[in-house]
Image (cartoon, rainbow, N blue to C red):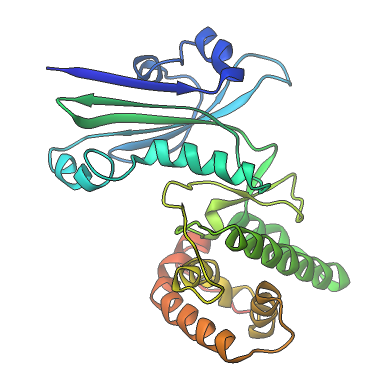
């Protein structure tokens, strides 16, 4: 069967990947070292240390493959014949975010394999974020454990920083389309930098300030928030994001749209953050 492969590697990482037999799709799929972070029937994310010692590079290898025939048909409009495949789109999006001056893991390589034109395997390699902590783990853990003035100040700092980051993201016309807490990383627990991951759904859109596309990102971000943040805190985030002291008519329209989109997400996202038990707002 006709087989065609594409492998794109950032020049700075080419020698490193070749040294570890990770410079082509066959090598990627033979590779079994490292720790599996997530795995399903047709995807896998693996954390890999390339070398030894404290300074050895850490990379993440994300693989997509076809595990059942019906995925060939569903993939027709997701990169096989139309649109852009996940791995390639995420590589491009991560590079684009960094070009915009927004923090994101550095994209290292991506590859695709086609048989008779059908996309059957692909991969993405990205650089690791130093001492990463997903936002949902930080909120349910360290943030909830704080007390007194430290708790109030830290919550305020998180809300202000995340509002500013989200505003910058949308001002650059980028919509993530999967803007849940699990896809936002902190580095070393610092609240002044956020790193976006799982950006394969993201795209540049010529957004107006009140564009509906913004509402979905805001809804995803707010979906689990009522169980960890008060209504006042959530409103403060929205006003900071909008750059206003009070809600005006367009603000209210966007807020209503955001809450309507967030409502059906809440139970599922809460279960992903803390499990089935629910915690009261603080």
* Residue 245 visible in the shown view: yes
Where in the figure is residue 243, as x and y percent of width and height? 71, 76
Q: Say whether residue 90 is left or right of residue 64.
A: right
Q: Quadrant of residue 13?
A: top right
Q: Quadrant of residue 149?
A: bottom right
Q: Nearer the viewer, residue 249 or 275?
A: 249
- The residue lying at 64 percent from left, 22 percent from top is 57
Where in the figure is residue 71, as x and y percent of width and height? 19, 42
In this picture, is 215 found above or below 118?
below
Q: Residue furthest top?
A: 19
Q: Quadrant of the C terminus?
A: bottom right
Q: Say whether residue 41 is left or right of residue 268.
A: left
In this picture, is 189 found above or below 239?
above
Where in the figure is residue 277, as x and y percent of width and height? 49, 70
Q: Quadrant of the N terminus?
A: top left
- The residue lying at 48 percent from left, 39 percent from top is 92
- The residue lying at 83 percent from left, 69 percent from top is 153
Where in the figure is residue 280, as x and y percent of width and height? 60, 79
* Residue 282 visible in the shown view: no
Q: Residue furthest bottom?
A: 249
How many marks do you count on the picture? 0
Q: Nearer the viewer, residue 97 or 233?
A: 97
- The residue lying at 45 percent from left, 75 percent from top is 262
Q: Nearer the viewer, residue 193 or 46?
A: 193
In this picture, is 70 found above or below 217?
above
Q: Nearer the viewer, residue 38 or 71?
A: 71
Q: Say whether residue 172 is left or right of residue 201.
A: right
């Amino acid at each position: 069967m006709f087989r065609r492969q594409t492998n794109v590697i950032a020049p700075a990482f080419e020698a490193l990947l070749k040294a570890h037999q990770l410079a082509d799709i066959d090598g990627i799929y033979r590779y079994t070292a490292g720790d599996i972070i997530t795995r399903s029937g047709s995807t896998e994310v693996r954390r890999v240390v390339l070398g030894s010692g404290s300074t050895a590079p850490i990379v993440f290898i994300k693989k997509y493959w076809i595990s059942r025939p019906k995925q060939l048909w569903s993939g027709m409009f997701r990169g096989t014949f139309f649109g852009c495949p996940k791995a390639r789109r995420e590589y491009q999006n991560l590079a684009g975010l960094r070009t915009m001056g927004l923090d994101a893991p550095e994209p290292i390589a991506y590859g695709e394999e086609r048989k008779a034109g059908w996309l059957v395997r692909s991969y993405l390699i990205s650089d690791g974020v130093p001492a990463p902590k997903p936002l949902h783990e930080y909120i349910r853990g360290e943030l909830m454990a704080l007390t007194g003035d430290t708790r109030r100040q830290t919550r305020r700092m998180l809300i202000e920083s995340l509002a500013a980051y989200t505003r910058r993201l949308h001002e650059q016309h980028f919509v993530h389309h999967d803007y849940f807490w699990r896809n936002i990383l902190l580095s070393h627990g610092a609240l002044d930098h956020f790193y976006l991951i799982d950006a394969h759904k993201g795209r540049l859109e010529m957004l107006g300030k009140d564009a509906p596309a913004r509402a979905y990102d805001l809804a995803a971000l707010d979906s689990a928030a009522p169980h960890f943040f008060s209504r006042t805190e959530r409103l403060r985030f929205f006003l900071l994001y909008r750059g206003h002291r009070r809600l005006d008519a367009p603000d209210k329209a966007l807020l209503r749209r955001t809450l309507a989109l967030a409502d059906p997400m809440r139970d599922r996202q809460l279960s992903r953050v803390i499990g089935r038990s629910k915690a009261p707002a603080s």
